[in-house]
Image: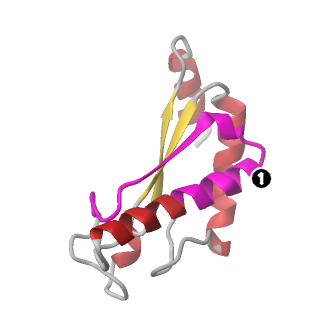
Amino acid sequence: VHFGFDDAAVRQQDQAALEKFAQVANAHYKGATITIEGFADPAGSQEYNLRLSRERADAVRDFLVTRGLDGAQLRTVGYGKSRLVRPGARAADEGAELNRRVTFVVETPAGAGATTVAAMTASR
């Protein structure tokens, strides 16, 4: 999921991917902790980008909750302009959108095992 410059709103074109993620998480990852990681491009101050990246993660969490995910299993974190996919790409630069993103880390409870992971891989 990517974002426009200086924007934390979930874009229309990313909603289908988030809806699919919610369906998969509901079907295969009940009880898992899902961390939603927000990022920003390097334009702006460190403080600003940390806030913006948290707002992006929060916006995705809120969207996923409206699609049936349990908010208690969702954590959000903002990393600002760290972990750039395209170092130096900012604002309207080519590839800057890749830096303005949200990613997911899914931590399954102990005992969930490889069956769930295998089912996910097979469904792709």
| Residue 14 horizontal/vertical position (percent) | 62, 67
Residue underneath mark 1: 66
Q: Is residue 122 visible?
A: no
| 80 lies above or below 88 | above
Amino acid residing under circle 1? Thr
* Circle 1: element type: helix
The residue drawn where x is 62% and y is 38% is: 123
The residue drawn where x is 31% and y is 86% is: 93
| Residue 11 horizontal/vertical position (percent) | 62, 73
The residue drawn where x is 53% and y is 56% is: 57
Q: Is residue 67 magenta?
A: yes
In-image side of 25 versus 99 (left or right):
right
The stretch in magenta equals 57-84
For this orientation, the residue located farthest to the front is 47
| Residue 46 horizontal/vertical position (percent) | 28, 68
In-image side of 30 versus 106 (left or right):
right
| 32 lies above or below 59 | above
Report which quarter residue 82 is drawn in.
bottom left
Q: Classify the position of the C terminus by image quarter.
A: top right
